[in-house]
Image (cartoon, rainbow, N blue to C red):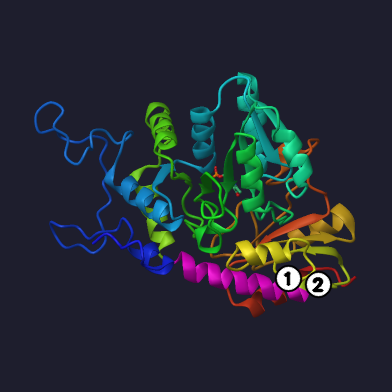
Amino acid sequence: MPPKKTEQFETRAIHAGQAFDPTTGSIIPPVYFTSTFVQDGIGGFRNGYEYTRGGNPTRTSLETLIASLEGAKHGLSFASGLAAEDALLRALLEPGDRIVLGNDVYGGTHRLIERIHGKWGVENVVVEMSDLAAVSKAVAGGKTKLLWLETPSNPLMKISDVAELAEIGHAAGALVVVDNTFASPYLQQPLALGADIVVHSTTKYLGGHSDVLGGAVVLDDDALEEKVRFLQFASGGVSGPMDAWLTVRGIKTLAVRMDRHSTNAQAIAEHLVGHPALDAVYYPGLPTHPGHELAKRQMKSFGGMISVALKGGPKAARKFAESTEVFQLAESLGGVESLIGYPSEMTHASVKGTALEVPENVIRLSVGIENVDDLLADIDRALPRK
Ligand SMILES: *Cc1c(COP(=O)(O)O)cnc(C)c1O
C-alpha cells in the first residue's frame, strides 16, 4: 500500500516507497542487484526498467521515500551529495549564468561551484545570507539563475530565513536551492517555506549510520525534474542498489534519531555556555543565538550540530579535538556516533583563504545518540579548565 499523503512523517519514513514484495510477501522489498532488465520483445520494458543507470527499483524506492519526506513530487538519488549538486548545477546553468551562495556553505559545494563550474563560465557571488539587502543586490541584474543557501550553516550554525530569501530570489527570477543536510526533512521543510529545490548529502542524517555515501535532489516542478533526470541518466552519477537500500534502512529511524540528536545537543550546548575555556558556543537552540527565534519558526527542533570557539586559539582547539574519547576525531556528521572535527584543517581546508574561511579556534561537534552523561563527561575531560 503506498502511504496516504495524510499520513504523518514518522509513518511515511517507514512506509513510503516500501511496499512489500508481491511474489513472496517479504516485508522488506528485495535489493535489486542487477545492471539490466529483460525486455518482453524489443522496447517491452517491465514497469519502465531498462538499464540500472536509467532506473533501478531499489533506487526508485529511495527516491519515492525522500520525495515523500520533503513533501515533494520528485526525488532523485545520486552516488554522493556532491554528485547530486553537480547534476543539478549542470542541468540548470549555462555559461554566463550567475549563482549566488552563502558565505558559509559546505566547503565542497563552494569548491565545486568555484573550481569546476567556474571553468565553464558560471560566475559565483558569495554573500552573507542574513544580510537581506546584500542578497538582493547580489541577485539583481537578471544573470542570477540560482540562489543557494544552507541553514543551519556549517560550521557556524547560522540560520537564514528561507521564506524571505525565497521571495528575494524569485523576485530576481532565480530558483532557490536549500541544502537541507544539517536539518534533515524531519526538522525543516524548505519547499513548504517557499524554496524550489532541496539538495541533501544523504551520507549524513538520512543514512544516519556512517556506513554509506549518497545524495539527493528533491523538487516539485515537472520540467525541472525532467532536466535533472536527464543529467542523472546521461552522466551517470547514480546511487547503486546497495547504497540506496542502506539509505532507506537508515531513514526508517530518522525521526527518533533526530529527536535524540537534538535533546543531546541542547543539553551539551547549555552545559558549555560560560565554560571558562570557550569564547563562544554556536547552537541555534540557545536563546542567545542570533538565529534562535527564526530557527524556532522554521525548524521543529535545533538538530545535533554544535560548534565552539576556544579561548586558547588554534593550539587549544587542536588539543581538544585530539583529546576526546567518545567523540571520535573524523570528518563527516549525522551518524549515531558522536564525532569531533577541526573545520579549518578538515571539512573546510578547501576554503582556506576564501570568503568562506573558518576561524582556526573553532571545533565542530556532531552530537550522536549515545547517553548524554557519557558525552558530557567526555567533553569535560577533554576541555581545558580555563
Ligand atoms: C557532506 C555535505 C555535502 C557533500 O556530500 P557528500 O555526500 O560528502 O558528497 C554537501 N552539503 C553538506 C551540508 C554536507 O554536510
Magenta-drawn stretch contains 90: no
Q: Write the start and end of the magenta stretch as one range.
A: 253-271
Locate the N terminus and report the quarter of the image it occupies: bottom left
Q: Label 1, label 2: how many angstroms apart (C-alpha)?
A: 6 Å
Relative horizontal placement of residue 228, taking residue 193 as reference (left or right) = left
Q: On residue 273, which mark appears?
A: 2
Under tag 2, what secondary structure? loop
Name the residue rendered at 41%, 46% in the picture: 75
The quadrant where residue 286 appears:
bottom right
Within 8 Å: ligand 1 and the Cβ of disc 1? Answer: no
Which is the main secondary structure of the residues drawn in magenta? helix
Q: Which residue is mark 1?
A: 269
Residue most toward the left?
A: 41
Name the residue rendered at 69%, 30% in the picture: 124
Q: Residues within 10 Å of mark 2 (few under 14, many from 20)?
A: some
* Foreground pick, 243 / 238: 238
Relative horizontal placement of residue 262, taking residue 36 as reference (left or right) = right
Q: Position of residue 170 (x, y in %)?
A: 60, 40
- Say what amino acid the circle numbered 1 marks: Ala
Q: Are marks 1 and 2 in contact (CB under 8 Å)?
A: yes
The quadrant where residue 101 appears:
top right
- Say what amino acid the circle numbered 2 marks: Val
Name the residue rendered at 66%, 80% in the picture: 373
Q: On residue 107, which mark appears?
A: none
| Residue 304 in view in this figure | no
Q: Position of residue 81 (x, y in %)?
A: 52, 43
* Foreground pick, 190 / 311: 190
Magenta-drawn stretch contains 270: yes
Q: Position of residue 193 (x, y in %)?
A: 56, 54
Relative horizontal placement of residue 287, taking residue 192 as reference (left or right) = right
